[in-house]
Amino acid sequence: MKRIIKKVAVIGSGIMGSGIACHFANIGVEVLLLDIVPKEPTEAEMKKGLTLESKIVRNRIVNEHLANALKSKPSPIYHQKFASRITTGNTTDDLAKIAEADWIIEVVVERLDIKKSVFEQIEKYRKPGTLITSNTSGIPIHFMNEGRSEDFQQHFCGTHFFNPARYLKLFEIIPGPKTSKEVLDFLNNYGEQFLGKTSVVAKDTPAFIGNRIGIFGIQSLFHLVKEMGLTVEEVDKLTGPVIGRPKSATFRTVDVVGLDTLVHVANGLYEGVPNDEAHDLFKLPDFISKMLENKWLGSKTGQGFYKKVDKDILSLDLNTLEYRPNKKASFATLELTKTIDIPIDRFKVLITGKDKAGEFYRKNFGAMFAYVSNRVPEITDDLYKIDDAMKAGFGWENGPFEIWDAIGVEKGIELLKAEGLSNAQWVNDMLASGNKTFYTVKEGASYYYDIQSKSQKKIPGQDAFIILENIRETKKVWGNSGAIIQDLGDGILNLEFRSKMNTIGGDVLTGINKAIDLAEKEYNGLVIGNQGANFSVGANIGMIFMMAVEQEYDELNMAIKLFQDTMMRVRYSSTPVVVAPHGMTLGGGCEMSLHADKIVAAAETYIGLVEFGVGVIPGGGGSKEMALRAADQFHKDDVELNVLQQYFLAIAMAKVSTSAYEAFDTGILQHGKDVIVVNKDRQIAEAKKHALLLAEAGYTQPIRRKDIKVLGKQALGMFYVGTDQMTAGHFISEHDKKIANKLAYVMAGGDLSESTLVSEQYLLDIEREAFLSLCTERRTLERIQFMLTKGKPLRN
């Protein structure tokens, strides 16, 4: 049977329920969001004459919860207008409406009796064959469907979204005793293809996969911290980006999530897994119990492991349980990894450290390796699912078995044995069978060690993906230190940035030109895409700063012209060029996207022209392109100045979209041309598909534009008056005004006496001139230097 999800009903509108509702709205699904009726009207409602019979009162809980979710940051929704896809109601008056739903998701409080009561009510109205799932984070699935009909049980399972539902990719699917294979296969595929998730089918064991391993990791750290006498700052330094984990590392993450939430799961595990060899680690250390008693739960209570007092961040001393000023953490071992850009390559070095950091890593990784090996096959039969869960649910760049491979399987066994621990027998059997690693790559596909067959087995579901890491060397056509060109097959090349933070400097520009040369001569098209954390944070401003400080203006002029000319090659090559932005796509990364034949953006793309923040205007064709796009929007009887002003403000306010969908509002993405994919893992494959479609449709090289209408002095006067008023009102500084006026000059086409048709090259030349003139300004150099040293913009 072909299933189509047109409407979803979400029962329970708390933080998790509203977040799930918003994410279904994100992907275009109609959502019915229900919650209970309040017991009585509020005082304010009674003053308005509202009674419990009033719909406003009866839907108050659900409406307040949804409104709070939509106001929260980061936002749970790609675009605020998508909220119109959500209809609210209450479980007393509106439960019958779930008969229209194709999928019903229960997200009520984590109590079995309440959940079973909700399921009893749901079964009265649910139509047979409808999916019914619970977003439980730990209640056994087999307890929930007791007493339900055969059809209910066949279509019932757990679907555990991680919070926040939009941003965390893990989607655990936990079958009940009678869940049909068709339902599991459907949910697995739907999670990947439509929700943009990493779907992981887990066994019905306490806390499933993600929280079982994640909570073990945190609890293990809690005990290790006390044993080794480490501070919270030291642990966060050791468990953050240096090992490919989020910046919030361990203790800041607990503060954000809430200590009570963590303790709830840890207590559940302590009770639920009495035979776990690490059972005692799930017992709370004394300092955690004291924090709970004091209600130091983290961000929600204003203090946890960290506390903000005025502008200062204080840290909790775990021995005295008093707050003290932050102490900067530093370790000699970490210094050894500064030249190693990729986290997976650091682990071999980290475990050799002679200081406290090296000892910490040996103990920490040893404990983790022992634990994850002993969870197979208890929580899953397939080791790769543990790695998938930790990467998608906890933001780890590499899963435990990938880290173990990087250190060496035999070396990992040494670490855990040194801590008096033992690994599962299957790891020894794996080595004995001649398999020396948990993972291998063959012909561009990833394989994992399968315990039952004692052989390497292909990880399923890869056919929809192109994993650049797997083909980086085998399909390499050309490369330098900043870029690699790979053959994606079917006559399509891919250019992957490999510079630090994917900045665009000389090597990357050389790579773009080389890729276009090759594609024009021997291939059908080109994709510019990568699978780093971010597509590109923009041009190499360090290089610009050095040239400007040394007053090498001729060299700087040539560098900017090379950037402009390369962007124009992206626009005017004789082969289709598709750009695939994701994550931060700023400045030059955005300019490159603007010049593509098509953008295939990940939904989580934060794109914008942010050059104002470093005291310049977009100089790689971005200012020109926004003037061109404004001109293309001019229609008869329009107030053309208003249209131009919108595009001007997108640059002048350094607007960055909070999703790819918002980029349509700023004119960076274009309706009818550019497309968005929700699952970033599918992005390169999707971009390749669109490059092929353009080629097969008979791609024709575009003709260079000479018909761009600019408004001259008419627009310039309007912009100058606006910047004068903003300066007089102290909304912008004198230097802001100077930058804005330079941008105005470019977008108006100069001080032409009347509206005129000009060429792109004309606009590029005045754009470059304006950019260079700003690079001679002391305040611009101060802004660039501040960004380079502090990582944030300076207002001067």
Image: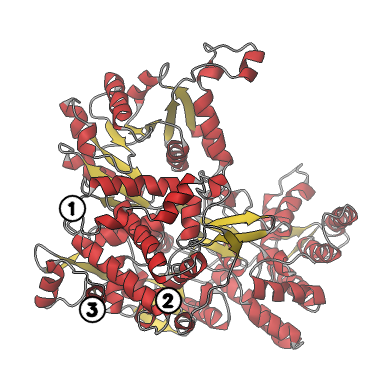
Q: What residue type is labelled 3?
A: Glu
**Label 1 – label 3 distance at C-alpha:** 25 Å
Which residue was labeled with disc 2?
342
Q: Which mark is residue 275?
A: 1
Q: Residues within 10 Å of mark 3 (few under 14, many from 20)?
A: some
Q: Which amino acid does label 1 sit on?
A: Asn
| Mark 3 vs mark 2: in front | 3
Residue 400 is situated, as x and y percent measured from the top left of the image, at: 30, 66
| Mark 1 vs mark 2: in front | 1
Q: Please, what secondary structure does the residue beneath circle 1 have?
A: loop
Say which of 744 and 414 sits in front: 414
Residue 712 is situated, as x and y percent measured from the top left of the image, at: 83, 60
The answer to whether residue 234 of the structure is visible from this angle is: yes
Q: Residue 414 carries which label?
A: 3
Query: Which is nearer the N-term, disc 1 or disc 2?
Result: 1
Whether residues under marks 1 and 3 lie with C-beta atoms below 8 angstroms apart, the answer is no
Report which quarter residue 122 is drawn in. top left
Residue 766 is situated, as x and y percent measured from the top left of the image, at: 77, 71
Q: Name the residue: 28% across, 71% down.
A: 366
**What is the number of callouts on the image?**
3
